[in-house]
Image: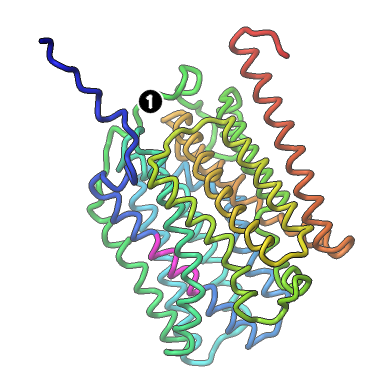
Amino acid sequence: MAPQTLAPQTLAPRAFAALQVPGYGMYMLGSGLAMTADSIEHVISYWMVFQKFQSPALAGYAVISHWLPFLLFSVSAGALADRLDPRRIIQAGMLLFIGCSLGWGVLFMTGALELWHAVVLFSLHGFAGVLWGPASQLLIHHIVGPEQLHSAVRLLSMSRVAGLLGGPAVGGAMLLAFGPSTSVIIGALMYLPLTLWLVRAPFRRKAHQESPQATPQETRPGGRGGGGILATAREIAGNRVVVSMTLLAGATSFVIGNAFQAQMPEFAADLGHGDADVYYSMLLAANAAGALAAGMILESRGVRHAEPRIAFMLVILWCLCMGGFAVSSVYLLSLALLVAAGFLNLAFGAMSQTLVQMHAPPAIRGRVIGLYGTSFNGMRAFSGVTVGMGGSLVGVHWSLAISAVVLAIITVGLYVLDQHVLDQRSGAPPP
Protein backbone atom coordinates (compact mmCIF):
# COMPACT_ATOMS: atom_id res chain seq x y z
CA MET A 1 0.00 0.00 0.00
CA ALA A 2 1.48 3.32 -1.07
CA PRO A 3 2.18 5.78 1.76
CA GLN A 4 -0.19 8.70 1.98
CA THR A 5 1.18 12.13 1.16
CA LEU A 6 0.30 14.75 3.69
CA ALA A 7 -0.70 18.19 2.47
CA PRO A 8 1.79 20.90 3.36
CA GLN A 9 0.84 22.48 6.64
CA THR A 10 2.01 25.89 5.51
CA LEU A 11 -0.84 26.13 3.04
CA ALA A 12 -3.50 26.06 5.74
CA PRO A 13 -4.48 29.50 7.03
CA ARG A 14 -3.47 30.03 10.63
CA ALA A 15 -5.23 32.25 13.12
CA PHE A 16 -3.09 35.14 14.37
CA ALA A 17 -0.22 33.87 12.21
CA ALA A 18 2.14 36.78 12.94
CA LEU A 19 1.93 36.14 16.69
CA GLN A 20 3.60 32.79 16.10
CA VAL A 21 6.73 34.60 14.88
CA PRO A 22 9.16 35.12 17.80
CA GLY A 23 9.16 38.73 18.94
CA TYR A 24 6.16 40.01 17.03
CA GLY A 25 3.78 39.72 19.97
CA MET A 26 6.00 42.00 22.05
CA TYR A 27 6.27 44.45 19.17
CA MET A 28 2.49 44.60 18.81
CA LEU A 29 1.89 45.01 22.55
CA GLY A 30 4.57 47.68 22.88
CA SER A 31 3.15 49.58 19.91
CA GLY A 32 -0.36 49.41 21.37
CA LEU A 33 0.90 50.68 24.71
CA ALA A 34 2.73 53.55 23.01
CA MET A 35 -0.43 54.48 21.11
CA THR A 36 -2.36 54.44 24.39
CA ALA A 37 0.21 56.84 25.88
CA ASP A 38 -0.12 59.03 22.78
CA SER A 39 -3.90 59.19 23.22
CA ILE A 40 -3.56 59.92 26.95
CA GLU A 41 -1.33 62.90 26.19
CA HIS A 42 -3.80 64.19 23.60
CA VAL A 43 -6.74 63.99 25.98
CA ILE A 44 -4.99 65.72 28.86
CA SER A 45 -3.05 68.34 26.88
CA TYR A 46 -6.11 69.34 24.81
CA TRP A 47 -8.15 69.71 27.98
CA MET A 48 -5.54 71.76 29.83
CA VAL A 49 -4.80 73.98 26.84
CA PHE A 50 -8.51 74.64 26.37
CA GLN A 51 -8.93 75.52 30.05
CA LYS A 52 -5.90 77.82 29.97
CA PHE A 53 -6.33 79.69 26.67
CA GLN A 54 -9.92 79.09 25.44
CA SER A 55 -8.50 79.37 21.90
CA PRO A 56 -10.22 77.66 18.96
CA ALA A 57 -7.23 78.66 16.80
CA LEU A 58 -4.82 76.80 19.08
CA ALA A 59 -7.14 73.77 19.10
CA GLY A 60 -7.09 73.87 15.31
CA TYR A 61 -3.29 74.10 15.29
CA ALA A 62 -3.14 71.02 17.53
CA VAL A 63 -4.91 69.01 14.81
CA ILE A 64 -2.93 70.52 11.93
CA SER A 65 0.41 69.98 13.69
CA HIS A 66 -0.52 66.33 14.20
CA TRP A 67 -1.18 65.54 10.52
CA LEU A 68 0.90 68.09 8.58
CA PRO A 69 4.27 66.42 9.34
CA PHE A 70 2.91 63.21 7.77
CA LEU A 71 2.09 65.18 4.62
CA LEU A 72 5.46 66.92 4.40
CA PHE A 73 7.99 64.50 5.87
CA SER A 74 6.71 60.90 5.62
CA VAL A 75 8.82 60.14 2.54
CA SER A 76 11.93 61.64 4.13
CA ALA A 77 11.32 59.62 7.28
CA GLY A 78 10.91 56.50 5.15
CA ALA A 79 14.15 57.24 3.30
CA LEU A 80 15.88 57.60 6.65
CA ALA A 81 14.53 54.20 7.71
CA ASP A 82 15.85 52.73 4.43
CA ARG A 83 19.38 53.96 5.15
CA LEU A 84 19.50 53.45 8.91
CA ASP A 85 18.28 50.82 11.35
CA PRO A 86 14.49 51.35 11.64
CA ARG A 87 14.64 50.28 15.28
CA ARG A 88 16.72 53.35 16.08
CA ILE A 89 14.37 55.63 14.13
CA ILE A 90 11.43 54.36 16.17
CA GLN A 91 13.40 54.86 19.38
CA ALA A 92 14.12 58.45 18.37
CA GLY A 93 10.39 58.99 17.91
CA MET A 94 9.66 57.41 21.29
CA LEU A 95 12.22 59.67 23.01
CA LEU A 96 10.56 62.71 21.43
CA PHE A 97 7.17 61.49 22.70
CA ILE A 98 8.64 61.03 26.18
CA GLY A 99 10.18 64.49 26.08
CA CYS A 100 6.85 66.05 25.10
CA SER A 101 4.97 64.26 27.88
CA LEU A 102 7.56 65.25 30.48
CA GLY A 103 7.46 68.82 29.17
CA TRP A 104 3.68 68.95 29.59
CA GLY A 105 4.01 67.44 33.06
CA VAL A 106 6.51 70.06 34.25
CA LEU A 107 4.50 72.94 32.77
CA PHE A 108 1.27 71.69 34.34
CA MET A 109 2.98 71.13 37.68
CA THR A 110 4.55 74.62 37.81
CA GLY A 111 1.63 76.46 36.23
CA ALA A 112 4.07 78.08 33.78
CA LEU A 113 2.30 77.02 30.57
CA GLU A 114 2.33 79.74 27.91
CA LEU A 115 1.00 79.80 24.36
CA TRP A 116 4.38 79.27 22.72
CA HIS A 117 5.04 76.25 24.95
CA ALA A 118 1.90 74.58 23.62
CA VAL A 119 2.81 75.37 20.00
CA VAL A 120 6.31 73.90 20.41
CA LEU A 121 5.12 70.73 22.17
CA PHE A 122 2.31 70.13 19.67
CA SER A 123 4.82 70.52 16.82
CA LEU A 124 7.39 68.17 18.38
CA HIS A 125 4.67 65.60 18.99
CA GLY A 126 3.77 65.68 15.29
CA PHE A 127 7.40 65.12 14.27
CA ALA A 128 7.66 62.21 16.72
CA GLY A 129 4.66 60.62 15.01
CA VAL A 130 6.15 60.88 11.53
CA LEU A 131 9.44 59.32 12.74
CA TRP A 132 7.46 56.42 14.20
CA GLY A 133 5.13 55.80 11.24
CA PRO A 134 7.18 54.58 8.23
CA ALA A 135 9.89 52.95 10.37
CA SER A 136 7.32 50.96 12.34
CA GLN A 137 5.91 49.48 9.14
CA LEU A 138 9.34 48.82 7.66
CA LEU A 139 10.43 46.98 10.81
CA ILE A 140 7.66 44.43 10.21
CA HIS A 141 9.73 43.08 7.30
CA HIS A 142 12.66 42.51 9.64
CA ILE A 143 10.53 40.48 12.07
CA VAL A 144 8.09 38.43 9.95
CA GLY A 145 8.29 36.86 6.51
CA PRO A 146 6.11 37.61 3.47
CA GLU A 147 3.69 34.81 4.42
CA GLN A 148 2.77 36.53 7.69
CA LEU A 149 2.92 40.12 6.38
CA HIS A 150 -0.84 40.63 6.01
CA SER A 151 -1.46 39.24 9.48
CA ALA A 152 1.33 41.39 10.95
CA VAL A 153 0.09 44.63 9.35
CA ARG A 154 -3.48 43.90 10.46
CA LEU A 155 -2.44 43.07 14.03
CA LEU A 156 -0.34 46.23 14.29
CA SER A 157 -3.28 48.28 13.03
CA MET A 158 -5.53 46.57 15.56
CA SER A 159 -3.14 47.30 18.44
CA ARG A 160 -3.03 50.96 17.50
CA VAL A 161 -6.81 51.14 17.24
CA ALA A 162 -7.00 49.58 20.70
CA GLY A 163 -4.72 52.32 21.94
CA LEU A 164 -6.82 55.00 20.27
CA LEU A 165 -9.98 53.46 21.74
CA GLY A 166 -8.67 52.86 25.25
CA GLY A 167 -6.38 55.88 25.54
CA PRO A 168 -9.08 58.55 25.99
CA ALA A 169 -10.88 56.48 28.63
CA VAL A 170 -7.65 55.75 30.51
CA GLY A 171 -6.55 59.38 30.16
CA GLY A 172 -9.83 60.68 31.49
CA ALA A 173 -9.73 58.33 34.48
CA MET A 174 -6.11 59.25 35.21
CA LEU A 175 -6.93 62.96 34.99
CA LEU A 176 -9.58 62.53 37.68
CA ALA A 177 -7.50 60.23 39.87
CA PHE A 178 -4.02 61.75 39.69
CA GLY A 179 -4.35 65.20 38.13
CA PRO A 180 -2.85 66.39 34.81
CA SER A 181 0.88 66.57 35.64
CA THR A 182 1.16 63.13 37.24
CA SER A 183 -0.99 61.58 34.50
CA VAL A 184 1.16 62.75 31.58
CA ILE A 185 4.31 61.69 33.42
CA ILE A 186 2.83 58.21 33.91
CA GLY A 187 1.98 58.31 30.21
CA ALA A 188 5.63 59.04 29.41
CA LEU A 189 6.61 55.83 31.20
CA MET A 190 4.25 53.87 28.94
CA TYR A 191 6.53 54.56 25.96
CA LEU A 192 9.43 52.76 27.68
CA PRO A 193 8.46 49.09 27.04
CA LEU A 194 8.64 49.53 23.24
CA THR A 195 11.71 51.77 23.48
CA LEU A 196 13.66 49.31 25.60
CA TRP A 197 12.49 46.21 23.71
CA LEU A 198 13.80 47.72 20.47
CA VAL A 199 17.36 47.70 21.84
CA ARG A 200 17.66 44.01 20.98
CA ALA A 201 14.54 43.43 18.89
CA PRO A 202 14.62 40.77 16.11
CA PHE A 203 16.19 42.19 12.97
CA ARG A 204 16.60 40.22 9.75
CA ARG A 205 19.35 41.81 7.68
CA LYS A 206 18.01 40.08 4.54
CA ALA A 207 14.59 41.71 4.82
CA HIS A 208 15.34 43.82 1.77
CA GLN A 209 15.40 40.80 -0.52
CA GLU A 210 12.98 40.98 -3.39
CA SER A 211 9.41 40.15 -2.52
CA PRO A 212 8.06 37.06 -4.25
CA GLN A 213 5.01 39.14 -5.14
CA ALA A 214 6.97 41.79 -7.03
CA THR A 215 7.51 41.84 -10.78
CA PRO A 216 10.92 42.64 -12.29
CA GLN A 217 9.75 46.18 -12.98
CA GLU A 218 8.61 46.58 -9.37
CA THR A 219 11.84 45.26 -7.86
CA ARG A 220 14.17 47.40 -9.94
CA PRO A 221 16.27 49.49 -7.54
CA GLY A 222 15.42 53.14 -7.33
CA GLY A 223 17.34 55.78 -9.16
CA ARG A 224 19.72 58.30 -7.67
CA GLY A 225 17.12 60.96 -7.24
CA GLY A 226 16.39 62.45 -3.85
CA GLY A 227 14.11 60.87 -1.31
CA GLY A 228 11.38 63.47 -1.75
CA ILE A 229 7.75 62.96 -2.67
CA LEU A 230 8.15 63.72 -6.39
CA ALA A 231 11.31 61.65 -6.75
CA THR A 232 9.70 58.66 -5.07
CA ALA A 233 6.51 59.07 -7.11
CA ARG A 234 8.56 59.00 -10.33
CA GLU A 235 10.36 55.83 -9.27
CA ILE A 236 7.14 53.90 -8.57
CA ALA A 237 5.15 55.40 -11.46
CA GLY A 238 5.17 52.08 -13.33
CA ASN A 239 4.20 50.04 -10.27
CA ARG A 240 0.48 49.49 -10.81
CA VAL A 241 -0.38 48.08 -7.39
CA VAL A 242 1.55 50.63 -5.34
CA VAL A 243 0.23 53.56 -7.37
CA SER A 244 -3.41 52.44 -7.25
CA MET A 245 -3.36 51.69 -3.51
CA THR A 246 -1.56 54.95 -2.67
CA LEU A 247 -4.02 57.01 -4.73
CA LEU A 248 -6.99 55.16 -3.24
CA ALA A 249 -5.71 55.68 0.32
CA GLY A 250 -5.19 59.38 -0.37
CA ALA A 251 -8.68 59.75 -1.81
CA THR A 252 -10.32 58.15 1.24
CA SER A 253 -8.39 60.42 3.61
CA PHE A 254 -8.84 63.63 1.61
CA VAL A 255 -12.55 63.30 0.87
CA ILE A 256 -13.78 61.84 4.18
CA GLY A 257 -10.91 60.73 6.44
CA ASN A 258 -11.99 60.95 10.06
CA ALA A 259 -13.46 64.47 9.82
CA PHE A 260 -16.93 63.13 10.62
CA GLN A 261 -15.73 62.42 14.18
CA ALA A 262 -15.35 66.16 14.81
CA GLN A 263 -18.96 66.64 13.68
CA MET A 264 -20.27 63.87 15.95
CA PRO A 265 -21.91 66.26 18.45
CA GLU A 266 -24.23 67.54 15.71
CA PHE A 267 -24.98 64.06 14.38
CA ALA A 268 -25.72 62.89 17.94
CA ALA A 269 -27.98 65.86 18.62
CA ASP A 270 -29.97 65.17 15.45
CA LEU A 271 -30.34 61.56 16.60
CA GLY A 272 -31.74 62.76 19.92
CA HIS A 273 -28.60 62.26 22.03
CA GLY A 274 -26.84 65.62 22.10
CA ASP A 275 -25.83 65.39 25.76
CA ALA A 276 -22.52 63.85 26.84
CA ASP A 277 -24.20 60.59 27.88
CA VAL A 278 -23.54 56.93 27.23
CA TYR A 279 -25.35 57.05 23.86
CA TYR A 280 -23.07 59.82 22.64
CA SER A 281 -20.02 57.93 23.89
CA MET A 282 -21.16 54.83 22.02
CA LEU A 283 -21.31 56.82 18.78
CA LEU A 284 -17.77 58.08 19.39
CA ALA A 285 -16.47 54.57 20.09
CA ALA A 286 -18.43 52.71 17.38
CA ASN A 287 -15.89 53.23 14.59
CA ALA A 288 -12.97 52.01 16.69
CA ALA A 289 -15.04 49.09 18.01
CA GLY A 290 -15.77 48.00 14.44
CA ALA A 291 -12.07 48.19 13.60
CA LEU A 292 -11.20 46.04 16.61
CA ALA A 293 -13.85 43.54 15.58
CA ALA A 294 -12.38 43.42 12.07
CA GLY A 295 -8.93 42.65 13.40
CA MET A 296 -10.17 39.91 15.72
CA ILE A 297 -12.49 38.25 13.19
CA LEU A 298 -10.13 38.37 10.21
CA GLU A 299 -7.18 37.20 12.29
CA SER A 300 -9.11 34.40 13.99
CA ARG A 301 -10.06 33.07 10.55
CA GLY A 302 -6.52 33.38 9.25
CA VAL A 303 -7.55 35.58 6.30
CA ARG A 304 -4.43 36.61 4.42
CA HIS A 305 -5.60 37.09 0.84
CA ALA A 306 -4.85 40.58 -0.47
CA GLU A 307 -5.48 41.97 -3.92
CA PRO A 308 -6.35 45.43 -5.28
CA ARG A 309 -9.81 44.40 -6.49
CA ILE A 310 -10.89 43.52 -2.93
CA ALA A 311 -9.46 46.80 -1.60
CA PHE A 312 -11.55 48.79 -4.09
CA MET A 313 -14.64 46.83 -3.10
CA LEU A 314 -14.03 47.51 0.60
CA VAL A 315 -13.86 51.26 -0.04
CA ILE A 316 -17.12 51.19 -2.02
CA LEU A 317 -18.81 49.40 0.89
CA TRP A 318 -17.30 51.95 3.29
CA CYS A 319 -18.80 54.75 1.19
CA LEU A 320 -22.21 53.07 1.43
CA CYS A 321 -21.91 52.88 5.22
CA MET A 322 -20.80 56.50 5.57
CA GLY A 323 -23.53 57.70 3.22
CA GLY A 324 -26.09 55.65 5.11
CA PHE A 325 -24.92 57.10 8.43
CA ALA A 326 -25.18 60.61 7.00
CA VAL A 327 -28.86 60.24 6.08
CA SER A 328 -29.95 57.96 8.94
CA SER A 329 -32.37 59.31 11.51
CA VAL A 330 -32.49 56.10 13.59
CA TYR A 331 -29.94 55.83 16.39
CA LEU A 332 -29.44 52.04 16.31
CA LEU A 333 -29.05 52.04 12.52
CA SER A 334 -26.51 54.87 12.75
CA LEU A 335 -24.58 52.99 15.42
CA ALA A 336 -24.55 49.79 13.34
CA LEU A 337 -23.37 51.67 10.25
CA LEU A 338 -20.50 53.25 12.18
CA VAL A 339 -19.42 49.85 13.49
CA ALA A 340 -19.56 48.42 9.94
CA ALA A 341 -17.60 51.43 8.65
CA GLY A 342 -14.89 50.84 11.24
CA PHE A 343 -14.71 47.17 10.24
CA LEU A 344 -14.33 48.04 6.56
CA ASN A 345 -11.86 50.86 7.21
CA LEU A 346 -9.43 48.62 9.09
CA ALA A 347 -9.83 45.83 6.52
CA PHE A 348 -9.06 48.22 3.67
CA GLY A 349 -6.23 49.98 5.50
CA ALA A 350 -4.47 46.75 6.40
CA MET A 351 -4.94 45.30 2.92
CA SER A 352 -3.74 48.39 1.05
CA GLN A 353 -0.74 48.76 3.38
CA THR A 354 0.12 45.08 2.86
CA LEU A 355 -0.12 45.39 -0.93
CA VAL A 356 2.11 48.46 -0.95
CA GLN A 357 4.73 46.75 1.21
CA MET A 358 4.65 43.53 -0.82
CA HIS A 359 5.04 45.28 -4.17
CA ALA A 360 7.38 48.10 -3.16
CA PRO A 361 10.90 47.98 -4.65
CA PRO A 362 12.99 46.58 -1.77
CA ALA A 363 15.76 49.16 -2.16
CA ILE A 364 13.35 52.04 -1.49
CA ARG A 365 10.67 50.26 0.53
CA GLY A 366 10.88 52.79 3.38
CA ARG A 367 10.39 55.70 1.00
CA VAL A 368 7.43 53.98 -0.64
CA ILE A 369 5.87 53.30 2.76
CA GLY A 370 6.49 56.97 3.56
CA LEU A 371 4.74 58.02 0.34
CA TYR A 372 1.79 55.85 1.31
CA GLY A 373 1.83 57.50 4.73
CA THR A 374 1.84 60.92 3.07
CA SER A 375 -1.27 59.91 1.19
CA PHE A 376 -3.14 57.98 3.90
CA ASN A 377 -2.23 60.10 6.92
CA GLY A 378 -1.10 63.44 5.51
CA MET A 379 -4.22 63.99 3.44
CA ARG A 380 -6.29 63.85 6.63
CA ALA A 381 -5.09 67.40 7.28
CA PHE A 382 -7.53 68.48 4.56
CA SER A 383 -10.43 66.15 5.32
CA GLY A 384 -12.19 68.87 7.29
CA VAL A 385 -12.65 70.90 4.12
CA THR A 386 -15.21 68.63 2.47
CA VAL A 387 -17.11 67.45 5.54
CA GLY A 388 -16.49 70.32 7.97
CA MET A 389 -16.47 73.46 5.83
CA GLY A 390 -18.94 71.87 3.44
CA GLY A 391 -21.18 71.25 6.43
CA SER A 392 -21.25 74.98 7.18
CA LEU A 393 -22.76 75.53 3.73
CA VAL A 394 -25.23 72.66 3.33
CA GLY A 395 -25.26 70.97 6.76
CA VAL A 396 -23.13 68.10 8.01
CA HIS A 397 -25.58 65.42 6.87
CA TRP A 398 -25.54 66.58 3.26
CA SER A 399 -21.81 67.30 3.27
CA LEU A 400 -20.96 63.79 4.49
CA ALA A 401 -23.46 62.17 2.11
CA ILE A 402 -22.10 64.13 -0.86
CA SER A 403 -18.54 63.32 0.18
CA ALA A 404 -19.41 59.61 0.29
CA VAL A 405 -20.88 59.79 -3.24
CA VAL A 406 -17.85 61.70 -4.54
CA LEU A 407 -15.46 59.18 -3.00
CA ALA A 408 -17.43 56.29 -4.49
CA ILE A 409 -17.18 57.88 -7.96
CA ILE A 410 -13.43 58.46 -7.51
CA THR A 411 -12.99 54.86 -6.36
CA VAL A 412 -14.82 53.48 -9.39
CA GLY A 413 -12.71 55.71 -11.64
CA LEU A 414 -9.48 54.51 -10.05
CA TYR A 415 -10.63 50.89 -10.38
CA VAL A 416 -11.41 51.34 -14.07
CA LEU A 417 -8.01 52.97 -14.61
CA ASP A 418 -6.29 50.18 -12.70
CA GLN A 419 -8.00 47.52 -14.82
CA HIS A 420 -7.13 49.40 -18.01
CA VAL A 421 -3.45 49.41 -17.06
CA LEU A 422 -3.65 45.71 -16.16
CA ASP A 423 -5.27 44.89 -19.53
CA GLN A 424 -2.62 46.82 -21.41
CA ARG A 425 0.19 44.97 -19.64
CA SER A 426 -1.40 41.58 -20.18
CA GLY A 427 -1.83 42.30 -23.87
CA ALA A 428 -5.62 41.97 -23.72
CA PRO A 429 -7.75 44.54 -25.52
CA PRO A 430 -9.47 47.00 -23.17
CA PRO A 431 -13.18 46.30 -22.54
Name above or below for residue 254 compared with residue 277: above
Query: From the viewer's perspective, is 389 left or right of 130?
Result: right
In which quadrant is the C terminus drawn? top right
The location of residue 185, given as percent across then percent down, is: 40, 80
The location of residue 360, given as percent across then percent down, is: 48, 31
Q: Which residues are magenta?
A: 32-41
Which is the main secondary structure of the residues drawn in magenta?
Answer: helix
Q: Element type at marker 1?
A: loop
The structure residue drawn at horizontal position 76% and vertical position 71%, both measured from the top left corner, is 266
Colour option used: rainbow
Dot 1, how many residues are within 10 Å of its Cα: few (below 14), some (14-19), or many (20+)?
some
The location of residue 330, given as percent across then percent down, is: 74, 65
Residue behind mark 1: 210
Q: Amino acid at mark 1?
A: Glu
Magenta highlight on residue 40:
yes
- The one of 200 and 120 positioned closer to us in this rendering: 200
Query: From the viewer's perspective, is 53 left or right of 73?
Result: right
Magenta highlight on residue 105:
no
Name above or below for residue 283 compared with residue 24: below
- The one of 122 and 325 positioned closer to us in this rendering: 325
The location of residue 155, given as percent across then percent down, is: 40, 50
